[in-house]
Image: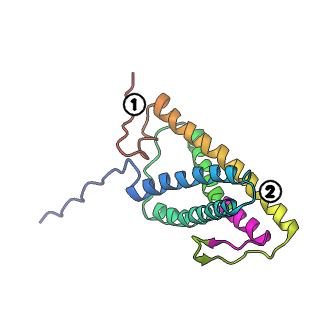
Amino acid sequence: MDPQPDPPVRRVDRYGIPAIGLHWGMAVLVVGGWFVGRWMTDLPFSPLKLKVYSWHKWNGVLVFALLFVRLVVRWLQPPPASEPMPRWQTRLAQAAHILLYLLLALVPLSGWLYSSAAGFTTVWFGVWPLPDLVPKDAALKVLFRSFHGGFTYVLGVLVALHVLAAFKHHVFDRDRVLARMVPGLKPRQSR
């Protein structure tokens, strides 16, 4: 009796639904958190300002939590194989993704540290009090505020470069880099 042939290996050429959902959901949270953060600092002290600060902190904690979910999904469902491109671009993309993940942890963590040092406990969604990571301390408040602002700036620049690179791949290289993360998007046809 002949042994049964192995089933054909299915080539995965796009990210799975969980990875796509987490990518775009976190993108909305990060961009929204950035805009809210810019807006709230100019508000006069009022109940609205306190509420907006709470929303901003809830958003940051959610991004921090979803990052771990995203890393588990990435481990369980590895990304599709890289598109053919020069080695330097592959290495740059890998380094940028590692830095993005790192900043997705450092921005919320530095905000949490800043809030703790300022003496404001974060109460997630107004229900779950999170532990203060450091005691109230004016010098630490200034330090963590600068870290939070600096990390946020670097994350903003990196996100902008990430978006530009995705469009470059779609418009100029006409490959599947962007199509792998956007449901229903087809690569542009070569001329």
Calculate the distance from the C-alpha at mark 2 to the C-alpha at mark 1: 43 Å
Query: For the view shown, which residue lies furthest in the front direction?
Result: 46
Q: Secondary structure at mark 1?
A: loop
Of labels 2 and 1, the one closer to you: 2
* Residues shaded magenta: 107-123
State the quadrant of the C terminus.
top left
The amino acid beneath tag 1 is Arg
For the residue pair 16 and 4, the one nearer the viewer reads as 16
Quadrant of residue 29 within the rendered picture: bottom right
Residue at image coords 64%, 45%? 158
| Amino acid type shown at disc 2 | Ser
Q: Dividing the picture into quarters, in which one does residue 125 lie?
A: bottom right
What residue did someone put label 2 on? 146
In this picture, is 70 found above or below 128? above
Indicate which disc residue 188 carries: 1
Where is residue 14? Give x, y as percent: 39, 48
Where does residue 37 sit, x and y in percent of width and height? 67, 53
Residue 27, magenta (yes or no): no
In this rendering, position of residue 161 left or right of residue 172: right
Q: Nearer the viewer, residue 120 or 163?
A: 120
**41 or 93, nearer to the observer:** 41
Q: Residue at x 74, y 67 (%)?
A: 115
